[in-house]
Amino acid sequence: MIRKIPVESIVALLVALFVYTALSKLIDFSKFSSEIHNQPLPRWLINILVFAIPGSEMILVVMLLTKSVRLYGLLFSFALLLVFTIYTGLILVRSFDYIPCSCAGIFSSMSWSTHLIVNVVFTTLALLGFLMERRRHKNSLPPENIRDTSA
């Protein structure tokens, strides 16, 4: 029971993050689309990302709330957040000719340094949640190779 609380707390934080960011993109989709088209990425990728980012955030919410696939939801949350964190880091080290922004809601008022810290925190939480959930799954499996000697 004690181990369940941290995983549930991590899941709740990730769900809140993804619901907030996805809804803020979808509520003002034209602004999000315009800003993502300003990203220093190949045009073909931008055309995919404009739908894939909010879509994947909402899919992750469903996965995180569904116990049977929560482990995968935590793993994919970690992967998505890691990509965002790396991208933010690249912006901070001036890897691009200009600094784009397609941040939503309160994130748009953050500095890129603050944004990186927030990303690192959520990326770390997603990884910890995945590791704890994986351990819980391993511990709940029936032991293998135990011989029944009662016969």
Image: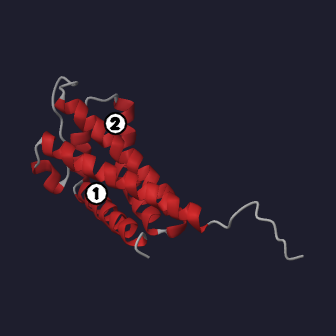
Foreground residue among 23 and 2: 2
Most extreme residue toward the right, as rendered?
Answer: 151
- SS class, disc 2: helix
Residue 46's disc number: 2
Q: Which badge, 2 or 1, comes first in the chain's sequence?
A: 1
Q: Residue at x 32, y 49 (%)?
A: 123
Kind of residue indicated by mark 1: Leu
The image shows residue 73 at horizontal and vertical percentages of 46, 57
Circles 2, 1 touching at the beta carbon (< 8 Å): no
The image shows residue 64 at horizontal and vertical percentages of 43, 63
Question: Distance between the Cα atoms at labels 2 and 1?
Answer: 16 Å
Quadrant for the C terminus, please.
bottom right
Residue 101's disc number: none
Q: Which residue is mark 1?
A: 26
Label 2 crowding class (10 Å Cα cut-off): few <14, some 14-19, many 20+? some
Q: Is residue 14 above or below residue 31?
A: below
Q: Is residue 124 above or below residue 148?
A: above
Kind of residue indicated by mark 2: Ile
Quadrant assignment, res 92: top left
Quadrant assignment, res 74: bottom left
Q: Residue at x 45, y 55 (%)?
A: 131
The image shows residue 87 at horizontal and vertical percentages of 28, 35
- SS class, disc 1: helix
Q: Is residue 64 left or right of residue 106?
A: right
Q: Residue at x 10, y 43 (%)?
A: 111
Label 1 crowding class (10 Å Cα cut-off): few <14, some 14-19, many 20+? some
Foreground residue among 4 and 102: 4
Q: Is residue 119 above or below residue 38?
A: below
Q: Is residue 48 left or right of residue 114?
A: right
